[in-house]
Image (cartoon, coloured by chain):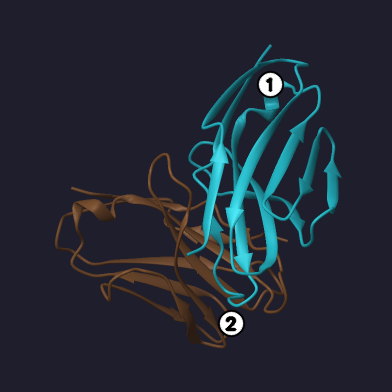
């Protein structure tokens, strides 16, 4: 069965303190891995799609990378406005219709 | 572009009642998926609609049903509400095809009392 595990569950950083969030996955053939940001009480906001091992994508202070077993979301010099829950989801190649989400990492950036 | 819109934003229902949630997809998108998100958890897939038919279903009982209209908008219906159905219900729209990203609405917060 497809599984997505995110770690840590929660992360507290000082403003400017860079770190990484982890998403480990087990899926029978990966069609795509997705990163979303979710603010409290809101819907997830799309960040990145990664399709194959070795792929990297960047957006402002965020950089997502992908290996055959996991993905990392690197946050460089974070600001308080980066505080949110970051969700990872996978889509299996045999099943183009279902995104399987992890429980998320709750990031807090203190000024 | 208005993005994905959902209505209502909040809803309180009594156990045993029925509820209908609505979703308008992002302009140009033809596929709508529904997710249930419990507090502190990631979204769980309920089902997906494409060309007015349910294309795939997650592990949810028959009390959960849906519909897609010719303009691609969609409804989620839940019958015989249980306390455990209290959650944030999310609608996501996408283009059918390979690994296309889904865009979410702001969700409907359903509370069953």
| Subunit bearing disc 2 | B
In this rendering, the answer to whether B47 lies above or below A5 is below
Q: Which chain is brown?
A: B
Q: Residue furthest left?
A: B16
* Residue shown at 59% from the left, 63% from the top: A27
Between A73 and B112, the one nearer to me in the picture: A73
Mark 1 Cα within 10 Å, few/some/many (few <14, many 20+)? some
Q: What hue does chain A carry in this figure? A: cyan
Q: Which residue is mark 1?
A: A80
* Residue shown at 38% from the left, 47% from the top: B38
| Total residue callouts | 2
The percent coordinates of residue A9 (x first, y second) are 51, 32
Same chain for the residues at labels 1 and 2, yes or no?
A: no
The percent coordinates of residue A32 (x first, y second) are 70, 63
The percent coordinates of residue A11 (x first, y second) are 58, 24
| Subunit bearing disc 1 | A
Residue B110 is at least partly visible in this image: no
In this rendering, the answer to whether A102 lies above or below A75 is below
Residue A54 is left or right of residue B18, and the answer is right
Residue B97 is left or right of residue B56, and the answer is right
* Residue shown at 48% from the left, 79% from the top: B56
In this rendering, the answer to whether A60 lies above or below B38 is above
Say what secondary structure mark 1 lies in. helix
The image quarter containing residue A20 is top right
> Are dots 1 and 2 in contact, CB under 8 Å?
no
Label drawn at residue B14: none
Residue B101 is at least partly visible in this image: yes
Quarter holding the N terminus of chain B?
Answer: bottom right
Q: Which residue is mark 2?
A: B71
Between A23 and A42, the one nearer to me in the picture: A23
Number of the front mark, 1 or 2: 1
In this rendering, the answer to whether A37 lies above or below B32 is above
């Amino acid at each position: 069965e497809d599984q997505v595990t995110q770690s840590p569950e929660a992360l507290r950083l000082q403003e400017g303190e860079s770190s990484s969030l982890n998403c480990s996955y087990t899926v029978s053939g990966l069609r795509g891995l997705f990163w979303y940001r979710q603010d409290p009480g809101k819907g997830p906001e799309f960040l990145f799609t990664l399709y194959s091992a070795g792929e990297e994508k960047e957006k402002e202070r965020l950089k997502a990378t992908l290996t055959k077993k996991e993905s990392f979301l690197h946050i460089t010099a974070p600001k308080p406005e980066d505080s949110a829950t970051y969700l990872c989801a996978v889509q299996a190649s045999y099943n183009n219709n279902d995104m399987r989400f992890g429980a998320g990492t709750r990031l807090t950036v203190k000024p | 572009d208005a993005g994905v819109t959902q209505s209502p934003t909040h809803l309180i229902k009594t156990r045993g009642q029925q509820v209908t949630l609505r979703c308008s997809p992002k302009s140009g998108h033809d596929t709508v998926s529904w997710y249930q998100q419990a507090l502190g958890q990631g979204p769980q897939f309920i089902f997906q609609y494409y060309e007015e038919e349910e294309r795939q279903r997650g592990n949810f009982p028959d009390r959960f049903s849906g519909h897609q209209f010719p303009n691609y908008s969609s409804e989620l219906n839940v019958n015989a509400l249980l306390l455990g159905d209290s959650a944030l219900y999310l609608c996501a729209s996408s283009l059918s095809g390979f690994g296309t990203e889904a865009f979410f609405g702001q969700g409907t917060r359903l509370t069953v009392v």
